[in-house]
Image (tube, rainbow, N blue to C red):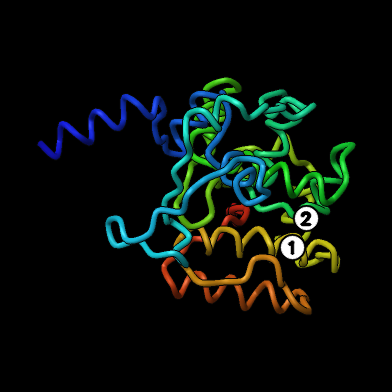
Amino acid sequence: MLNYLVELAQERWGDEWLTTRQVADLKGTSTRQIGQSIFRGAIPAIHVVGKDGRHENAAWSLWAIKRSDAEAWQFKPPAFDLTDRMHAFILLAGAIGLSGTNIASLTRVSHSTASVRFQMMNNARHVKKMIKKYGLEGIEYRFKVGAHADWRKFAHRFPQVRSAFERYHDGKPTLDDCYLIVRILKNQMAANGTKVNVNAPGKVSHGTVDDLVARMRKAGIKPYLLPKHRKR
């Protein structure tokens, strides 16, 4: 009897609850976009607490959205295409460990734009799509950092990175080289599960890079360095 009354109430209600994934599919966007719209108040939603061990402060807690509210929400896609070649380059640059400042110097976007758009693309679904579209098989998606790649596989795309590692290899790196190398190697450490602050390199020098390389090898991580010259 109770089930009948619930079903009857649902029919009379004429609506249904959807997950953020269902709304994203309905509107042709991402769950990240739906979440952002919920927090901005653009989409009315109910925070589902207590389901499957989730609680109100959990980042992985659930939201429920009425279909009528989802259909009424006017989704305006961004004025840029996150799947074009420029964004494929931004994704690749972020994957090898370049900062927003580095990426901005290589593209015609600002530091903040480069950082924000990389974060928008840095999810398993989008990365998989870009790998397939542009043949970026050297990129992997790792749980800790998202998109990750060994810069050496794409050295032809980043000559300035190769030059920095070549100068370090020859014992003549500049200060800028050291900052770049430290960030890339820390990105590699993070991708291998080591707790490290990629965005805070601190004061660096040639010795800082040497110490970082020694630390990585001690942890069983083979740094993304250029191979040593073979003796003839």
Position of residue 152 relative to residue 168, above or below, is above
Residue 68, x across and y down, in percent: 51, 28
Dot 2 alpha-carbon crowd within 10 angstroms: few under 14, some 14 to 19, many 20 or more:
many
Badge 2 element: helix
Q: Secondary structure at mark 1?
A: helix
Point 69% across, 29% down: residue? 82
Q: Is residue 11 left or right of residue 217?
A: left
In this view, the residue farthest toward the top is 133
Report which residue position mark 2 lands on. 164
Image-quadrant location for residue 170: bottom right
Q: Are marks 2 and 1 in contact (CB under 8 Å)?
A: yes
Pick the residue in front: 205 or 133.
133
x and y percent of residue 138 in the render? 53, 36
Residue nearest the viewer, comparing 31 with 110: 31
The residue under the point 66% across, 53% down is 97
Q: Which mark is residue 47?
A: none
Image location (x, y in percent) of residue 165:
72, 56
Question: Which residue is the site of mark 1?
Answer: 168
Q: Residue at x 68, y 31 (%)?
A: 88
Quadrant in which the N terminus appears: top left
The amino acid beneath tag 2 is: Ala
Q: Nearer the viewer, residue 15 or 134?
A: 15
Q: Quadrant of residue 49?
A: bottom left
Image x and y of residue 72, in percent = 61, 26
Query: Could you tell me the amino acid type at mark 1?
Result: Tyr
Q: Marks 2 and 1, Cα distance to the nearest angstrom?
A: 6 Å
Q: Residues within 10 Å of mark 1 (few under 14, many from 20)?
A: many
Q: In the rendered image of this protein, does residue 160 appear above or below residue 66?
A: below
Q: Tell me what residue is drawn at x 72 percent, y 38 percent.
A: 90
